[in-house]
């Protein structure tokens, strides 16, 4: 039953990407208060739900007798690595836009999309293999990642414009289902799941902050805090 629910949620995540081009009205709203709320929800999910789960996975790594024991007490280093990877990618994109070299920009676009395809595939995989215990767990994961995808779509479209709508959103949509499909036919051990969750946590934090912090984004602090507070209360009292 949970597998079918996870599949429906995977389809829901693909719909977010496919319909993202029709959400351009966000850019004309008083910043995009909804985008700032989305950022707050994503960060709340990382700090209130994922990080405590990482602690459990870290304990499992400590008790494991395989090669992954190398990461004993270092699950959070993997999370930091996820943040660093996406920060480096963002710097690369910004530099290419300053050079305004069409060939370079096209190459950067494909690198950017490839990394986000892997990111989305990871999200799809964890949707079915991430240890969701019931409908509530799956829904909270789905909802947090849905609003996160809306924010990501906005940023990617701003960076790559028409080429994103032409190719990017389709590839990202398919990637979620590919990740889910891989999870449906094969499973990895709990220790590796912990490392994947750690990488995802750091990636989400960076992808949220890169949309919220730059001055030109016109972010709304109180909308961000509202999303953060509301979803934190929901996670504390529902999970």
Image (cartoon, rainbow, N blue to C red):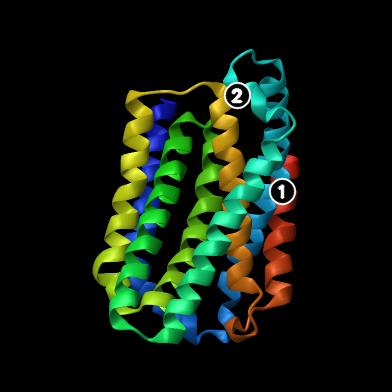
Q: Which of 167 and 64 is in front in this view?
A: 64
Residue 53 spot, x, y in % from top left: 68, 34
Give the residue number, with chain letter if any, for mark 1.
47
Q: Nearer the viewer, residue 177 or 81?
A: 81
The residues bearing labels 1 and 2 have C-alpha atoms spaced at a distance of 24 Å
SS for callout 1 = helix
Q: Nearer the viewer, residue 157 or 28?
A: 157
Q: Which residue is drawn at 52% across and 38% down?
A: 138
Residue 8 spot, x, y in % from top left: 36, 41
Left or right, 137 with reference to 231: left
Badge 2 local density, few (<14 within 10 Å), some, or many (20+)? Answer: few
Left or right, 229 with reference to 191: right
- Looking at this rendering, what residue extends furthest in the top direction? 65
Residue 36, located in which quarter of the rendered image? bottom right
Q: Is residue 192 above or below residue 209?
A: above
Mark drawn on residue 187: none
Q: Which residue is drawn at 51% across and 52% down?
A: 145
Left or right, 2 with reference to 232: left
Q: Is residue 22 above or below residue 2?
A: below
Residue 59 spot, x, y in % from top left: 73, 23
Task: Kindly tell me whether residue 45 is visible in this rendering.
Answer: yes
Quadrant location, the C terminus: top right
Q: Cβ–Cβ below 8 Å for labels 1 and 2?
A: no
Give the residue number, with chain letter if any, for mark 2.
68
Q: Which of marks 1 and 2 is nearer the N terminus?
A: 1
Task: Kindly tell me whether residue 131 is visible in this rendering.
Answer: no
Residue 4, located in which quarter of the rendered image? top left
Q: Nearer the viewer, residue 15 or 156?
A: 156
Quadrant location, the N terminus: top left
Residue 191 spot, x, y in % from top left: 59, 24
């Amino acid at each position: 039953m949970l597998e079918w629910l996870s599949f429906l949620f995977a389809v829901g995540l693909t719909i977010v990407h496919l319909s993202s081009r029709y959400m351009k009205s966000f850019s004309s709203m008083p910043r995009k208060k909804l985008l700032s709320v989305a950022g707050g929800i994503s960060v709340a999910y990382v700090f209130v739900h994922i990080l405590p789960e990482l602690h459990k996975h870290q304990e499992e790594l400590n008790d494991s007798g395989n090669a992954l024991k190398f990461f004993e007490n270092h699950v959070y280093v993997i999370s930091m690595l996820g943040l660093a990877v996406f920060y480096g990618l963002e710097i690369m994109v910004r530099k290419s836009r300053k050079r305004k070299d069409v060939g370079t920009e096209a190459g950067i676009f494909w690198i950017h999309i490839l990394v986000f395809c892997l990111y989305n595939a990871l999200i799809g995989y964890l949707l079915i293999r991430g240890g969701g215990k019931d409908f509530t767990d799956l829904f909270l994961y789905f909802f947090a990642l849905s609003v996160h995808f809306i924010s990501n779509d906005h940023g990617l479209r701003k960076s790559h414009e028409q080429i994103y709508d032409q190719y990017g959103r389709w590839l990202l949509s398919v990637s979620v289902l590919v990740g889910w499909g891989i999870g449906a036919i094969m499973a990895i051990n709990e220790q590796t799941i912990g490392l994947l969750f750690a990488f995802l946590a750091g990636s989400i934090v960076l992808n949220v902050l890169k949309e919220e912090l730059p001055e030109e984004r016109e972010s709304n602090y109180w909308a961000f805090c509202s999303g953060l507070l509301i979803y934190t209360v929901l996670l504390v009292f529902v999970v």
